[in-house]
Amino acid sequence: MTTEKNRIAIAILALGGQGGGVLAEWIQHVAREDGWIAQGTSVPGVAQRTGSTVYYVELARPGADGRVPVMAQMPMPGDVDVVVASELMETGRAVLRGFATKERTTLIGSTHRVYAISEKQVAGDGRGNGDKIIAAAQERSARFIGFDMEAATEATHSVISAIMFGALAGSGALPFPREAFEQAIHHSGKAVKSNLAGFAEGFARAQGPVAMPAKAEADLPIPTTPAGQQLAARIYELPEAARTLAIHGAARLMDYQDAAYAGLYLDRLEQVARLDAAPFTLTAEVARHLALWMAYEDTIRVADLKVRASRFERIAQEMKLKDDQVLALTEFMHPRLQELAEVLPTGLARRLLNGGALSRWLEGRFTKGRHARTTGLRWFLLLRMVAALRGWRPRSLRYAQEQARIGEWLDAIATVTARDNTKAIEIARCQRLIKGYGDTFERGLDNFRWIMERHADVDCEQIREWREKALADDQAKHLSRVMAA
């Protein structure tokens, strides 16, 4: 951007709560201090993630005759010099709307993701393709600056608006010195120290290459107890393709239940491995999906996760809780009678769910959701008591039901493997349909059963097609149309 340019149009795309308005005000302050005329407008959006807003800042040098220029209210496609986006999908929206152009636009965008509702509600993997957005951003802009601004925010204990402000200054797209940007932060008088730290980080990262978020390297999670070491020794006898998945699967099940339950997981996995052959894709798929199924989400598991100290610590960190502040956490919980009864011993649970007078009366007591303040003593102790029922889980109705379903699934895989290994892999992957609890779980289980009842009469391509239809949306409407036909 040359200093001779008399008009600069800047579009800022940010989510609700990310400080896009503060960023726009900082930019205007810098320009006005240098004698420019500055105007800022914004159009708030709804429904995306937390609401997506487009802020528009237009800067202009005063005319030689003193006349005030007429400025636009919104950015126009092909007429934007700088675009700043707080998240990868917002970067894609800027490109899609034509704000970024090859001939003139400096595009600055974060490469991290905040997933949209439309991505989350898909039963399968509904995430957008980030690599395509990066490629489009580089192709459709004069210069693209991209890095993980969320990670930079956490590293500096700052806010993402300060990171974006620093990246804007570091890009050289505006004809103002670094000191002018820093002075704007001082002038605001709010969180000056942390905002300056974020600004410096953004300024430095703007000088580097495009960088995607770093993938966290998970440590091998098997505990170093004697039982854990015995499991680890068995895992390293498995085919290499399945070992990492088996390590995490066994660790998950030790956390979920105990070492004996993780041993049952390895017993089953070893049986599949004996039937499989190189490259052992089937064993790897079963290692993944069997662990997920055996760690099904019952009331005991939900209660356990709700009151873990690590969860409260994570939320406090995300909220940037200060030492003199108290966290109050309220959850909306809607347990049904069936979900509560299923954690009881089999005989008692069946009597409560037999549809009799007692069953009907109890169902009426669990028709409405409840707001549970899990940071309060009453609900915290109640959930801790439910979580403590883990020891009798193997005697519960739900445990018996899930182990029977898992056994039927593994039997089907073993039967098909001898004839068609590829088809067995597709059957193993059908476990993806079973997830969550409540209505989500029941719907996924119904779809799984429907496919399993017909798998013997179709080929692997048909099984894959049915599974993908079931995972295409949260209501499985695509598969429902097939089922109805």
Image (cartoon, grey):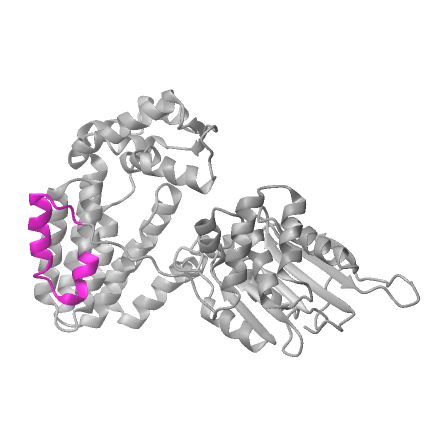
* Front one among 191 and 238: 191
| Residue 177 image offset from top left, x and y in percent | 65, 62
Q: Quadrant of the C terminus?
A: bottom left
The residue at the far right in this view is 65
Give the magenta range.
Answer: 222-246
Residue at the (79%, 59%) spot, across then down: 35
72 in relation to 444, above or below: below
Question: Which image quadrant for residue 378?
Answer: top left
Residue 233 within the segment the image draws in magenta: yes
Say whether residue 48 is left or right of residue 59: left
95 in relation to 375, above or below: below
Residue at the (26%, 66%) spot, across then down: 426
200 in relation to 256, above or below: below
Q: Quadrant of the N terminus?
A: bottom right
Question: Which image quadrant for residue 395?
Answer: top left
Say whether residue 163 is left or right of residue 349: right
| Residue 422 image offset from top left, x and y in percent | 22, 72
| Residue 275 image offset from top left, x and y in percent | 9, 66
* Front one among 350 and 330: 330
| Residue 446 image offset from top left, x and y in percent | 33, 51
Residue 245 within the segment the image draws in magenta: yes
Q: Main secondary structure of the magenta part?
A: helix
